[in-house]
Amino acid sequence: MATGKRRTSTAYVCGDCGAEFGKWQGQCSECGAWNTLSEVALAARGAATAPARGRGGWTGQSASAVVDLATVADSPEQRVATGIGELDRVLGGGLVAGSVVLVGGDPGIGKSTLLLQMLAGLGGRLKGLYVTGEESLAQVAARGRRLDLSLAGLLSLAETGIEQVAAAIGAQRPDVVVIDSIQTMHVEAVTSAPGSVSQVRESAAWLVRLAKTAGTCVFLVGHVTKEGGIAGPRVLEHMVDAVLYFEGEAGSRYRVLRAFKNRFGAVNELGVFAMLDRGLREVPNPSAIFLSGGDASRPGSAVMVTREGTRPLLVEVQALVDQSPLANPRRVALGLEQNRLAMLLAVLHRHGGIAAYDQDVFVNVVGGIRVQEPAADLPVLLAVLSSFRDRPLPAKLVAFAEIGLAGELRPVPNGEERLREAASHGFVKAIVARANAPRKSPAGMEVVACDSLAQALAALDD
Ligand code: TYD
Ligand code: MG
């Protein structure tokens, strides 16, 4: 590096949110996490973020120039479909040259499998490079063969030094690179251990620069733990173009890939896969897989129509409400936000006349999917009420509506599309906010339009 002498000062970076501080403190004042700050050498950062400029013919654009924005032509990004439809959907239509995509998820969820399948599927159309820092090449090849992938022409490299990875990318000029995982990579100029916040950040910064200058599409694999304890993908979220999280429930073979951030597509878009013994298979019509199955309706079970990303999904939510022996009864929400549940229970008491303050309340969204939209409010309360009364909801009922603190039902986007999806799966009754009721109900379905929670509860007994 030709910058001469450099200040060797340090900063402290939060491993959870990436906030930077001048001095160490026990708690991150940005995100509130404890003991997540670690030291980052700033001098090394300068070095690490300046990858190999001037390498023959491989530096992309030269000096930047100031231009009149009106004279800049659009360049609609070139998309290349990966051939895995559910992945393309989450990416916003396929791969974009020069983009950096972070794929996060728990260990063992299927990140390596998905990306190896993607590279093999691209073979022949795009040149791929799989960089493994965790498994040996023999292990990667063995997995590929077991999955029956065509590996010919797929380049691979077992390496953890970013300088060497960059050199290989420079020499081979692949179109798509997978780095598995970013936590195993290190930059020589940075002295801290691989996996530390500074190494993860510097390695990623280097790869981001590379992607932009060489026009390579780079996938970074990042492990997250439930506690977020290790220097995880969280510190990278703002550096990359897209963040995809791979989620699933232990014991379920379904996996959901969710776009958490995407400069090139819709966020919250979902891709659904099933993990089989031959790898990940896409589930192109997932609308009904999040129902627990079986026709008999049980107390405590309600079906909602959620719309994550750009398509409606039928999702079952289950509640168990039981007399609590505790002074502070438990409120447990799986797949939903805990605070939202507490708020909904307060609304149920105040506007529905149902007191749950001496009851433990457990709510679970079936299938390991996370539901983030407020359309789940009404079905969650219907499930709670059904368990509380130990009475099943009417058969073939769906519901979706946001609930306000005044007990009012609010409409949610794309109501008609949700109703049509439910009708096509044989549901015969829907409880929705008034503005979501279409002038003409879908064939075979009775749509009950309600203004308030009280009306919705009354509609159950009709
Ligand atoms: P993997 O892709 O290695 O996970 P990650 O890279 O996210 O850590 O997937 C590992 C899990 O997937 C492992 O528990 C075994 C399971 N699996 C299958 O069930 N079928 C398969 O064909 C493969 C390759 C993995
Ligand atoms: Mg892996």
Image (spheres, rainbow, N blue to C red):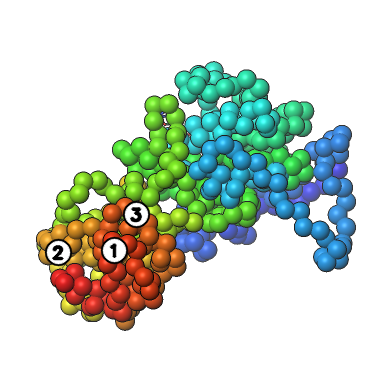
Mark 2 or 3, closer to the camera: 3
* Residue located 26% across and 64% down the image: 429
Residue 223 percent coordinates (x, y): 49, 41
Give the mark count.
3
**In the rendered view, would you say 461 is above or below 194?**
below
Query: Dot 2: within a 10 Å radius of its alpha carbon, few (fewer than 14), some, or many (20 or more) residues?
Result: many
Provide the residue designation for mark 2.
Answer: 388
Q: Is residue 416 visible?
A: yes
Amino acid on which disc 2 is placed:
Phe
Task: Give the quarter of the image for residue 167.
Answer: top right
Residue placed at 70% from the left, 35% from the top?
175
* Distance Cα–Cα, label 2 vs label 3: 30 Å
Q: Position of residue 261 (x, y in %)?
A: 56, 55
The earlier-in-sequence mark between 1 and 2 is: 2
Q: Secondary structure at mark 2?
A: helix
Residue 424: mark in rendering: 3
Q: Give coordinates of residue 350: x percent, y percent.
A: 23, 79
Mark 3 and mark 1: Cα distance apart in space? 10 Å
Give the residue type at disc 1. Met
Count neighbours of disc 1 (C-alpha within 10 A) and say few if under 14, some if 14 to 19, many if 20 or more: many
Please state which amino acid type lies under the numbered disc 3.
Ser
